[in-house]
Amino acid sequence: MKSLIVYCSSHGTTEKAVRFLSESLEGEVLAVDMKREKEEFDLANFDTVIIGGSVHAGNIQRKIKQFIRNNLETLLEKDVGLFLCCMHDGETAIEQFNHAFPQELRKNSTAMGLFGGEFLLSEMNFIEKQIVKKVSGATIDQSNLDYEAIKEFASKLNHIKSIV
């Protein structure tokens, strides 16, 4: 079974989650950061497509939204996993997740995950730091990346693969 992970990582948190996820998935895995890599791939070559990103100013990265829009029909025919890295939890995180991914794709997904997040002020530009400080009060790097949630997400996808 072959899996494709399509993601965007702005400051490295989503990339960190994807590395851990890739190690937790069975079979061959190709991970492509849409923000940095120009790797060509054909969705037809993958059994499972995993899509994820992080929240910035209330939205997932534009390249992720564009990828979903351009490939929605094909994605609806695949086993799909959706994940979001964000610092919120509870209802706020669920609202951000629902805003990030179209309902049609969420309803069709095999696995959905909220992986926690990080404020990496050391990686942010001046404006980003000011926004984070104002919104969250964070003045130093903070991490609440949820490795258990990532393992559980991978387990759901691995279970689907073992049934097929």
Image (cartoon, grey):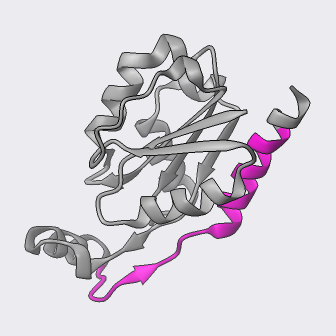
The percent coordinates of residue 66 (x first, y second) are 31, 27
Residue depicted at 54% across the width and 70% down the height? 145
Quadrant position of residue 2: top right
Quadrant position of residue 139: bottom left
The percent coordinates of residue 11 (x first, y second) are 30, 66
Work out which residue is located at the far left of the displayed protein and give it: 126
User: For residue 156: magenta?
Assistant: yes
The percent coordinates of residue 141 (x first, y second) are 34, 84
Residue depicted at 27% across the width and 37% down the height? 62
Asked whether 24 or 132 is in front, the reply is 24
- Quadrant housing the C terminus: top right
Residue depicted at 42% across the width and 44% down the height? 32
Residue 131 visible here: yes
Q: Is residue 126 left or right of residue 99?
A: left
Asked whether 17 or 107 is in front, the reply is 17
Residue depicted at 62% across the width and 37% down the height? 3
- Quadrant housing the N terminus: top right
Work out which residue is located at the far bottom of the displayed protein and give it: 140
In the depicted structure, whether residue 21 falls above or below residue 110: below
User: For residue 57: magenta?
Assistant: no
In the depicted structure, whether residue 134 falls above or below residue 150: below
Quadrant position of residue 110: top right
Residue 104 visible here: no
The percent coordinates of residue 121 (x first, y second) are 26, 79
In the depicted structure, whether residue 119 falls above or below residue 113: below
Asked whether 16 or 42 is in front, the reply is 42
Write the start and end of the magenta stretch as one range. Answer: 137-159
Work out which residue is located at the far top of the displayed protein and give it: 73
Q: Is residue 78 left or right of residue 1?
A: left
